[in-house]
Each structure stands twice: as structure tokens, then as C-alpha cells.
Amino acid sequence: MVEGSHQNLAARFFEKVGRICVSALEEMGRHGVMIGESFHWLFLGPGMNQPVRLGAVFTEMMEIGVRAIGIIGIMAAAIGAMLAIQGIYSLKIFGAEGHVVVGVAFSMVREFAPLITGILVAGRSGSALSARLGTMKINQELDALEVMGINPVRFLVVPSLLASLVMVPVLTFMSMVLGLYAAALYVNTALGMSMAAFFDQTIDVLSVDDLIHGLSKAAIFGVLFALIGVLNGFLVKGGAEGVGKATTRSVVQCISAIVVTDMLFALVATL
Amino acid sequence: MSDTEKPNAKNVIEVRGLVTHYGTRQILNGVDVDINEGEIMVIMGGSGSGKSTFLRHLMALQRPTSGVIKILGQDVWKLPQKKLFELRKKLGVTFQGGALFSSMTVGENIMLPLYEHTKLDRLTMQIMARMKLEVVDLAGFEDLMPSELSGGMVKRAAEARAVIMDPRILFFDEPSAGLDPVVSSQLDDLILRLRDAMGMTICVVTHELESAFKIADRITVLDKGSILFTGTVEELRNHPSDRIQNLLNRRSEEAEIDADEYLRRLTGDKEEAEGMPR
């Protein structure tokens, strides 16, 4: 009897693990299909009288990028100053406060600017994308588009993907500059190092590769959050509760995907 | 099937052997329907009869398990994507909740198909949108957002959007649902006006008997995924079937109880009770 129940428990456990694996694979497959479909509509859409409207891309760029400038700017400046404060505090132990610029410049350009921008954009626009598409789905607006002969991926997804692919790196570059500027201000106050000297050292330390490293990551984060946001929206089931769940799931998945990708990217790029 | 079908009437919609499933549950069991040009066909049936699923198939929104759906002579699931888009321009749909895009004004909603499928200038599109709004008695409402309209107005605006491309076939999903009898009757008049003025073929899915009798040229009754009846309103009224008379007289029927199935449902034996919703 007991043996039987143990076997039952084990079978259930493996069944659950199997289900999780299958659903993870399914999710990855869906992302692949969505990317494929987006490319399809981007390049072959015009031939089928289904072009991606530039106006829609600009509207999304405005929503994802321009409207996020304020909060991302504040966060980037805070992170830059924090890095300078912590850097000086740690380096003081070795009497090497003067080298704080190296740490701040590398950390900000290679790591913190893309990460903080990605996370903020994901929290702000990834959830909004899911909520918007999910609501459109339960209100049959996606069906309405389809029967009007307007492909929803071409009309709604591709503009968001393109906009985030452009705007996340742009916002990341802005974060880098603002973060470094805030750090320079603190170093100037704390160590008396002039702003010119700070930026001279920064430019000496950093290479184009570092900049490319940060911006490439940002582009990947942009695509990731748009894909996750869109897919969660498209897969909404049920009513308002379904939209709520999709939104939460979208934010959690976006941030997890961004952090894990960041780690993998750093690992591969520094090998 | 009806024996009153006009022999020379041209079928604009032809459905043969339509079978569809949700998971293991069979929803439609080999449905055959012909809809003739210029007629108003009402698809009726109780909740869970499969009528909304049937409509989704007719709009080529859902691929069936098997069967053929021909719209304007073209098998919708064998058409290349580009041709399917072309075909869809000839269809108009009014969804149950209107499905107006909440981020656009009423005017923008109505102009969207024109904007996407034509190269008309904005002024011409605006004039066309206003003309359609006149048809549905919503003139002057083009700058309002859908959230500022009442339920009946949303449906009428959705109708204006559905007819903006002058489609050959118009679908209505539950046009009277959630509306008071007066507004519902106005919508019925509008459907008749659209058929008479524009010569459209109209397919309406509804469970409202009064509305169906008012507008239908022919009625198809779906029951548990199969066709119970197709014919004129008069034929339906005089049909000898108890099931149909129960439906017409709003009499509820005792569901036949399968003792084994009932027991399985109670004991929650999901694997045995195959096909039950989980």
C-alpha cells in the first residue's frame, strides 16, 4: 500500500516535471514563431499590401522611449552616483580612491545602464503591452483586425518590436551619459577631481567594444521584453483576471529574462 | 434541410461536413449549410449549441477539424494568405461587444479599413465614414471615444465599420445581446435596411426569437453541434419536431441522464469522463 503510494507520488512528480519542460519548450517555440512572423511581415508584408506603418512605429517609440526618459534619467543618475559613493568607500581601504573612475565607467557602460534601462522599460512597457493586447483579445478586437484583413502581428507586434529595438539602446546610451555625469559630480565633490579629468579618464579607460557590449545587450533586452509582453498578451484567457495574470507574468518573465540574458552575455563576452 | 431553397440562387457561403473540436470535446458534428446571395440567414440555437463556433469558422478565424468552407466560391483554408486577405475585404463583421478599438475615436475606427486597404486621401475617408455614420444614425459622433457611447451606439458604430468597405457578406454575432427591446428592434431595422439598400448577404447569429423572426429570410437551428432545421420562418413555426417547438415556446427540456456518466461526474473520475470540461 505504502509502496504503491510512493510510486504514485514519484509518477506525479515526474509528470509535473515533464509538463513544466514541455510548457517551457512550447513557450520558447512560440517566441521563435513570433520572431519569424515579425520578420515575415516586416519584409514580405509590403508585397501583400500589408506594410508595417512607420507612423505606428513612431507612436510606439514615443510610448516606449520618449515617455520613459524622465524616470530612466533619474534612475540612471542615482545608480551612477551610488556606484561612485560605493567605489570611493571601498577603494579608500587601499588608498586608491583616484581609481574610482575605472570601476564606475566599466560598471555603468557595460552593466548598469543596459540593465537598469531594460528592467525599467520592461516594468513600464512590457506590462502595458501585455495588458493592451490581452484586453484587445478578450474584447475580440484582435479577431476584428483579422476579419478586416489586417494581420495583428503586422499591425500591433512589429511596430512595438522595432520601436523597442531602437529605443532601448537609445535610452541605454542616455543612461550611460547621465550615470557617468552624476558619478562625475559626486567624485568632483568628494575628491575634488574636475569633471574634465573624470571624463578624460573615462574615455581613456573605455573602448568602443565596451560601448558596443552595453548597447548590444540593450538591443537584446528590447527584443526580449517586447516579445514576452506581446506573447503574454496574445495568450490571455478568461476575462479581466486573465489580463491581470498575464500582466504580472509578463513583468516577472521580462525581468528574469533580462537578468539571465545579462549574465549569459557577460559570461560569453568575457571568455 | 429546406426544400424551399431557390434552385438558381447563387451560394455565397457553402459549408460541407464541418466538424470541430475543443480538445476532446466535439462541438460541431458534420454541419452542412448553404447561404444564398442577398438573403438574411439567421443561425439560431441555445447556449452551447455551437453557433458562435460555427460563426468563427464562417469568418475563417478558426480552422475546423474537417470539412469544407467555401466563401464566394473559394475554399478559405486552401487559399494562399494574400488571397485570404483579399477575400476578407469582402466580409464585414459586427462582433457581440462591438470590438471597437478603444484607443481610437469612432471616426478612426470606421476609417481604419479604408486607411489600411485603400489609397484614398484623408478627406475622402472622412466623408465616407460620415456617410456610413449617417446610415446607422450616428452622425456627429465621429470624434467621440468608444467608451463615451452607449451599448446600442457601440453596436451601430461597429456596423458602420463593418460596412465601410461595402462588403458582399455581413456577419452579426448576437446583435441584440444586452440591449433593450426598442434599441434591439432599431438594430433589426438597420440590418433589413442594409440588406435592401446595399444588397448584402447577411448572416446573423442570435438566440433572440423575436429578432430572428423579424429579419430572417431563412433560419438554421443548431442543436448540440448538428443542424436541427433549415428553412423559412413559416416552416420553422409549423415544424412538427418537439425539440423545435420547445425552443420556439421557450420550454425547457429534461436532459437525458446517463447513469454511468452522472456517477463518473460525481466521483470526479476525470479520465473516465472523457470530454468533460476540466
Image (tube, coloured by chain):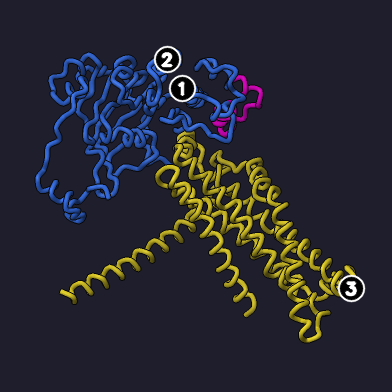
The answer to whether B12 is drawn above or below residue A10 in the figure is above
Q: Secondary structure at mark 1?
A: helix
Residue A179 at x, y = what percent?
A: 76, 64
The furthest residue to the bottom: A94
Which circle marks residue A192 in the picture?
Answer: 3
Discs 3 and 1 carry the same chain letter: no
Q: Secondary structure at mark 2?
A: helix
In the image, what residue type sits under mark 1?
A: Gly
| Residue at 58 percent of width and 64 percent of height | A258
Q: Is residue B60 magenta?
A: no
Q: Is residue B108 left or right of residue A238?
A: right
The chain whose colour is yellow is A
Q: Is residue B117 magenta?
A: yes
The residue labelled by disc 2 is B186
The residue labelled by disc 1 is B152
The answer to whether A56 is drawn above or below residue A206 in the figure is above
State yes or no: discs 1 and 2 in contact (Cβ < 8 Å).
Answer: yes
Which circle marks residue A243 in the picture?
Answer: none
The chain whose colour is blue is B
What residue span does the magenta drawing correspond to?
A: B107-128
